[in-house]
Amino acid sequence: MTSIPLAEPPSTPAPATRSREFWAGFRDTIPLVVGAVPFGIIFGALAVTNGLSPLAAIGMSLFVFAGSSQFIGSNLYGAGAALPLIVLTTFVVNVRHALYSATLAPYVRNLPHVWLVPLGFWLTDETFVIVARHYQEPGDVRYKHWYYFGSAIFMYVNWNVCTLIGIIAGQSIPDPARLGLDFALIVTFIGMVIPSITTRPILASVIAASIAALIFNPLPNNLGLMVAAIIGVIVGVVVENRLPAAETDTQKGVSA
Amino acid sequence: MTELLLVVGMALVTFAVRYPVMVLVGRLPLPESLFRALRYVPPAVLAAIIVPGIVMPAGRIDLSPTNTYLVAGVAAGLVAWRTKNILLTIVIGMGLFLFLRLVVFGV
């Protein structure tokens, strides 16, 4: 590596390698982990308060690994809901992950299943957003799944460590919901979405999804979220198609 | 036993909307238009999570200045817009949120 070819695009100053991609994914996930820490700790604390055994709370974080559905599941369990109802609710709450998986599918289609199984399992809102952005950026695509891996493993380990801390500290936090630390997750998402609004179609998409989310919020089990997301996507596409070509050009390679 | 079934059931349905979808959609010949449409998924989903979270934290629309979620959320949005720095957005947004909640309103 004594000389860098002149043809190299300026956005990729160094050639992509497995470890560079891995650590880039890890690094870009640091702020997202900061936002997820309180959320994970509250989950551990609340799950045990709700009457779940520590082992089941740990099991959920290890094998389900989907924050909001874990909250809802442990709440329903504590309230004595029937098992099939809890499982069905979990499914509906997590249906948005099907949208995430579909979005990433074209980028990871050539990976073997040894990769797809863990990468699929490790999808979260946070990892999805930064990985989708990374795949849409120009540059060497060969090792981008290592970026995904770096982000995902960091979120996973953090979530499980935080769950454990929450379980242990649970008894000493009088009322964990009181602090409203669920705001940590919201503020993380705010920090992710605002800088991603770089074009008019994206802005239109965000506004439409926001309004639709308020209108459809009364729908049960987070279904309003799915409806709002789909409306946002449709509005984004419609606005993109109506703009003159010059404006749509700036759209390329720019998204959340 | 019930807890084991709970964790296994939740794990199975959650995995079912992740990995199989990734594999199946990857095998389909996706039209370019759909591929482009899916790029709006991240901003749309995030907006659909954020806005009800700050505008109606207690389940109904609350636009009053005592809604700490809304005040801190808007402030965080401004920080994100001006700085494009996620970490700074989280620290300032969360700091303001806790300050309003614990000091100003003394919840």
Image (cartoon, coloured by chain):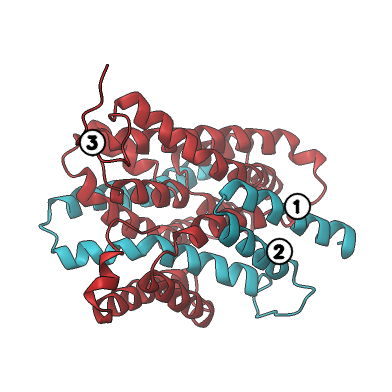
Chain colours: A red, B cyan
Q: Position of residue A204 (x, y in %)?
A: 41, 76
Q: Secondary structure at mark 2?
A: helix
Q: Position of residue A67 (x, y in %)?
A: 53, 50
The residue identified by callout 2 is B72
The residue identified by callout 1 is B95
Cα separation between marks 1 and 3: 43 Å
User: Which amino acid type corresponds to the residue marked 3 in the rendered image?
Assistant: Glu
Give the number of the mark in front: 3 or 2.
3
Q: Chain of mark 2?
A: B
Q: Chain of mark 1?
A: B
Q: Position of residue A211 (x, y in %)?
A: 50, 80
The residue identified by callout 3 is A8
User: Which amino acid type corresponds to the residue marked 1 in the rendered image?
Assistant: Gly
- Residue A95 appears in view: no
Q: Secondary structure at mark 3?
A: loop
Q: Is residue A118 above or below residue B87?
A: above
Residue at image location 64% in from the left, 74% down from the top:
B55
Left or right, residue B102 beside residue B94: right
| Marks 3 & 2 on one chain | no
Residue at image location 49% in from the left, 67% down from the top:
B47
Cα separation between marks 3 and 2: 43 Å
Pointer 2: residues within 10 angstroms few (<14), some, or many (20+)? many
- Residue B41 appears in view: yes
Residue at image location 30% in from the left, 64% down from the top:
A251
Q: In the rendered structure, find residue B13 and report the number of the disc placed on it.
A: none
Cα separation between marks 2 and 1: 9 Å
Q: Is residue A80 above or below residue A66?
A: below
